[in-house]
Image (cartoon, rainbow, N blue to C red):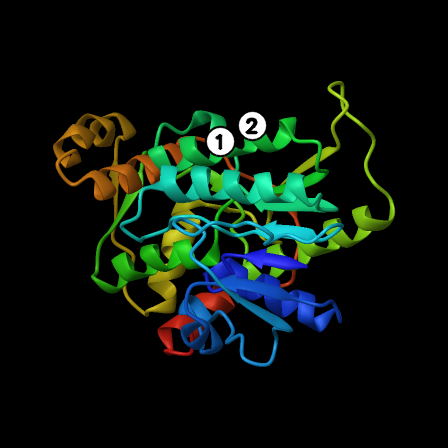
Amino acid sequence: MLVAGASGYLGRHLVSTLHRRGLRVRAVVRDVDRAGGPGAHGAPALAGLVDEWVACDVVTDRLDGLVRPGETVISALGVTRQKADPWDVDFAANLALLAEAERAPAGQFGYVHVMHAERSRSQLVRAKRAFVAALRRSPVPSAVVNPSGYFSDMEELLAMARRGVAVSLGDGSVRLNPIHGQDLADFLVERLVARGTEPPAMDELGHRHGEWDVGGPEVFTLREILQLCFAVCDRPARIVDVPTGLLRAGLPLLRPAARTHDLAQFFLDGFSGDGVGARTGTHRLEDHLRAVERGED
């Protein structure tokens, strides 16, 4: 299997899962030496887990011949907190990879999207949404997972709790079940392995495309997660409820800092309604946050 974006948080967990299952892994990374070491948020080092390294910048390099006939391609390409333009990475780079998958042709294409992408106005999610629209039209069978949110995202809430005061959107009643990267990787790989032996039925356009909303095993409200963060860092819970409308009104003030503005838009839209996916995995959020607090992640 070919994993693009293998040195990122989720990419590392995908490689680890594939290796653990005895599957051959080709990892596309920009820097092999960096990828061999441990990643952020407790993501595993890739040294010893990769059968073939492909040193390539998928944003700027030509991808001719990257994908082999019948190969499964998994893309974890995407902008998180980098300064890159999501239209260059989440859309254009993934589209170039999909073109190579169609040329080969690949056996199937796995992609990690976001839950409820339709309600987000951030450039990040709009770029992802545009790519998934192209993927759905592709003749290459595909599998897309839409996570409710990552444990690593919840570390931002823990950081607020450490500072003594946390801001909650509205009354904090929005529900979500964030997922650990390893559990999400396990879910996607299982779907790809199963579909490799039994392709899904065709849709009305004659394409084979499967999509799943997925989250971790525990469902929380935003307020419950904030309270958990205060408990983990052993501080009294001081939570300030800020009306969503007030936060939206303040968004234009961030426009001069385009990246900060887009991240704020992303999180504000993400918490504008419930985001609960199918419960899966075994990792508990409290265990993860306590490991972070101890400096283990």
Instruction: Examine the rendered structure and indicate whether residue 278 appears above or below residue 209.
Output: below
> Is mark 2 in CB contact (under 8 Å) with mark 1?
yes
Q: Position of residue 103 (x, y in %)?
A: 65, 41
Looking at this view, is 224 or 10 the one in front? 10
- The amino acid type of the residue labelled 2 equals Ala
Q: Position of residue 263 (x, y in %)?
A: 30, 42
Question: In screen coordinates, is 142 left or right of 296?
Answer: right
Q: CA distance from mark 2 to mark 1?
A: 6 Å
Q: Position of residue 199 (x, y in %)?
A: 83, 40
Residue 55 showing in the rendered view: yes
- The amino acid type of the residue labelled 1 equals Arg
- Callout 2 crowding tier (Cα within 10 Å): few <14, some 14–19, many ≥20: few
Q: Which residue in the structure is indicated by mark 1?
A: 129
* Mark 1 residue element: helix
Looking at this view, is 297 or 229 the one in front? 297
Question: In screen coordinates, is 294 left or right of 176?
Answer: left
Instruction: Examine the rendered structure and indicate whether residue 50 appears above or below residue 202.
Output: below
Residue at figure coordinates x 39%, y 71% from the top left: 292
Q: Which residue in the structure is indicated by mark 2?
A: 133
Residue at figure coordinates x 74%, y 49% from the top left: 191
